[in-house]
Image (tube, helix red, strand yellow):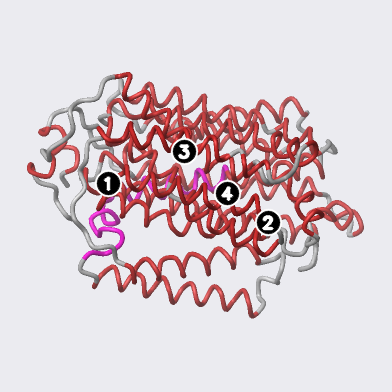
Amino acid sequence: MDQPTSQTLRQPQAPALSQAEIRTIILGIMLAMLLAALDQTIIATALPTIGRDLGDLEHLPWIVTVYLLTATAVTPLYGKFSDSHGRRITMLIGIVVFMIGSIACALAPTMIVLILARGLQGLGGGGLIALGQTIVADLVAPKERAKYQVYFASVFMTSSLIGPVLGGFFAEHLHWSVIFWINLPLGLVALLIAYHGLKKLPRHDRPHRLDLLGALLLVAATVSLLLALSWGGLRYPWGSLPILGLVAASVVLWVLFGLRMRTAPEPLIPPGVLHNPVVRMGTLSACFGMGTYIGLTIYLPIYFEAVRGISASSSGLALIPLMVGTVAGATFSGRAMARVKHYKRLPMVGLSVAILATAVLALFAGRVPFIGIEIILGVISIGLGTLLPVSTVAIQNAVALHDLGAATGAANFFRSLGGAFIVAIFGAIVLGGAGLSEGGSFETLAATAASRGVNLADVFAYVFMAAVVGFGLALAFILAMEERPLRGGSVKAAEAAIAD
């Protein structure tokens, strides 16, 4: 492993920031992260209106898919670039690209132009979340860092709650383009705060060369895999030539990327980051924990509508316990992490509770009263929430300061991949269990299941059992993660924390 030295940890830093300056920077970061998080939720309820207005329903899913592809693929690039050239300039680039993409989306005259503009928007939004977490790591020591992760959890909760409501309101009462125009005032405020506030941010960057070939291989491998996961079972059968071809191409590209990592003078992701056991175990735990959570947020509304018989708008409200609980769990875990020595115990207990609650949901999927389901979802999300600050802070605590961006970017990248993978698994269970053909859609789910005599409650029981497995893997990896003392302000503590 690339061992950091005392000189590395004593790099010159900017003067200490006041609490007021830190709060201003945090506010700017939260706005930037809100841009990326809100844009993934606000568009969902406006999609039918966009399709009708632009006269193209066939390519409508690509509005969501292309943003996911580009945003996920470029996340590690932002981390590496910020390690080389500084967080401030990298954050400014991300915000500006995102705003340009938003303008292009709002002005798009056709569906194809809108899809291309969403891809551009994803190139900007892909690094905002990981950069925000990295900047907090530059500002405060790991012992105090976890409590700031709570603010970011509140950003995701806010976007999940108000995004669909705003999207539907704008599309129905104003115009669907407003969901993109609203990014401009938010982006300008975030841009101004980042431009002025981040001037005093401590810098740990080193002069590096960006591995463009490695970046190209990573992007191509990621896009191939996400396309296979997005299309498999919906657009094409899982065993069809297009899906198998995409999977084969992704495997080959990942192998080439691995070879490039071994031979490049300065690989895109430093080998010391991937070889670090804390980074590896923490990333895998977050990957399965958050991936399972994302899968539940997507398929629970279908469960509510198809099995419990409630309306689409009510199913959104029924997800509130799942959204709010993660913030509650992260708040408790983040505050406690700075005060306890064995911080791993927090997510160990939390994930164990989440596993038990999900198992109850799996065993009694069709018989639990609605209020009981809401309580169970709250318990699941609180338990999962305890993992979020612990995994992020533990990963950042285990690497040298000049590798913070690469480590945080890699963790977010693999977490996104985990989400796409688990969503695909849940989709395969639902589609296969209901007997839908490759051309089927979730709108015809209940009718197809009824015609085949399939009880959808039993189908979703398997989805919830898969969620038990996902949370179980998250628990296994957090158990395997080494618990290193959190760095305080001294060089000696930092060296002790990141030495193997």
- Which amino acid does the dot numbered 2 rest on? Gly
Query: Which dot, 3 or 2, sits closer to the camera?
Result: 3
Tell me the quadrant of the picture where the N terminus can be found: bottom left
Q: Which residues are magenta?
A: 266-293
Residue annotated with mark 3: 32
Q: Mark 4 vs mark 2: which is more N-terminal? A: 4
- Spatial CA distance of label 4 from label 2 is 30 Å
Q: Nearer the viewer, residue 410 or 385?
A: 410
Query: Which dot, 4 or 2, sits closer to the camera?
Result: 4
Q: Residue 76 vs residue 422: left or right?
A: left
Q: Residue 348 vs residue 260: left or right?
A: right
Query: Which dot, 3 or 4, sits closer to the camera?
Result: 4
Residue annotated with mark 1: 86
As helix, strand or loop, the secondary structure at mark 1 comes to loop
As helix, strand or loop, the secondary structure at mark 2 comes to helix
Residue annotated with mark 2: 427
- Which amino acid does the dot numbered 1 rest on? Gly
- Spatial CA distance of label 3 from label 2 is 31 Å
Q: Mark 1 vs mark 2: which is more N-terminal? A: 1
| Label pair 3/2, CB-CB below 8 angstroms | no
Q: Which residue is depicted at the point 49% across and 72% down?
A: 250
- Which amino acid does the dot numbered 3 rest on? Ala
State which quadrant residue 204 falls in. top left
Q: Mark 3 vs mark 2: which is more N-terminal? A: 3
Magenta-colored segment: predominant secondary structure: helix
Q: Residue 360 vs residue 436: left or right?
A: left
Q: Which residue is depicted at the point 73% across and 38% down?
A: 170
Mark 1 surroundings within 10 Å by alpha-carbon count, few (fewer than 14), some (14 through 19), many (20 or more): many
Q: Which residue is depicted at the point 55% across and 53% down?
A: 101
Q: Mark 3 vs mark 4: which is more N-terminal? A: 3
As helix, strand or loop, the secondary structure at mark 4 comes to helix
